[in-house]
Amino acid sequence: MASQGNLYQTLVMAAKEHLDRTGRLPDSVAALASLAKVDLKDAQQIFASPQAIYDGLIYQGVILLNDALREGVLETDSQDPVSQLRALAEGYGEWAERNPALFRLLSEGLNQPMAEDGTLHRYTLSMRELFLRKLTEMRDLGILAKDTDLNDLLLVLHALVKGANTLFTTRSFDPWLHGDSRSSRLLTRIVFDEFINGILRSHAPVSEHAD
């Protein structure tokens, strides 16, 4: 028998490959064991139920997405929160494009009630904290006016992210995007550039010497 860690990865990858191929998760632990070519009893020690398979894929998706976002941010100037926000948006769109089935699974999960100790709940709050930190840095650096209400900006940003999620997961049958060959990465850049450029204009500091 493989080590617990190796067996977990084997099962998770088998579930992900099935999701990528069919758009669905394996409907039972037995089905997953068959796909992964491992003994059923061994698989049951890792995943006791279909819900456990779902939780495992959600966790894997969040890890992979976070890695992609972190990689993009690390390539930007650490002192430039605007560039970092743009990098986050582009990394998000690129990952969604490369992992459509897993991205759909995450998006659907984020639009449902979440257990407070669950992976998605922790993930979405960590993203809120990250966005708040970048907006706060922009205000502290004088990029945004000191009286900018960051909670208002967070609300708009939250709506944008949810809208972008829907855009990516429904674009194949969205009449507004029929015939639009632009990549999800490009669409994300357009949406978030409009947001970032808009707040830079509307919340720019007023010069002390302005009349």
Image (cartoon, helix red, strand yellow):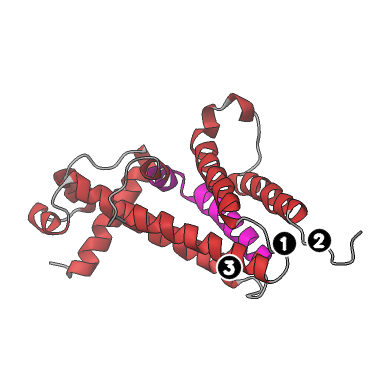
Name the main secondary structure of what is drawn in magenta. helix
Q: Secondary structure at mark 3?
A: helix
Q: Quadrant of residue 75?
A: bottom right
Q: Percent position (x, y) of residue 199?
A: 70, 53
Magenta span has 90? yes
Mark number for residue 73? 3
> Which residue is nearer to you in this view: 30 or 126?
126
Amino acid on which the number 2 mark rests in the picture: Val
Dot 1 corresponds to which residue? 145
Q: Secondary structure at mark 1?
A: loop
Mark number for residue 103? none
Q: Percent position (x, y) of residue 153?
A: 60, 52
| Mark 3 Cα-neighbour bin, 10 Å: few <14, some 14–19, many ≥20 | many
Q: Are marks 1 and 3 in contact (CB under 8 Å)?
A: no
The answer to which of marks 1 and 3 sits earlier in the sequence is 3
> Which residue is nearer to you in this view: 152 or 115?
152
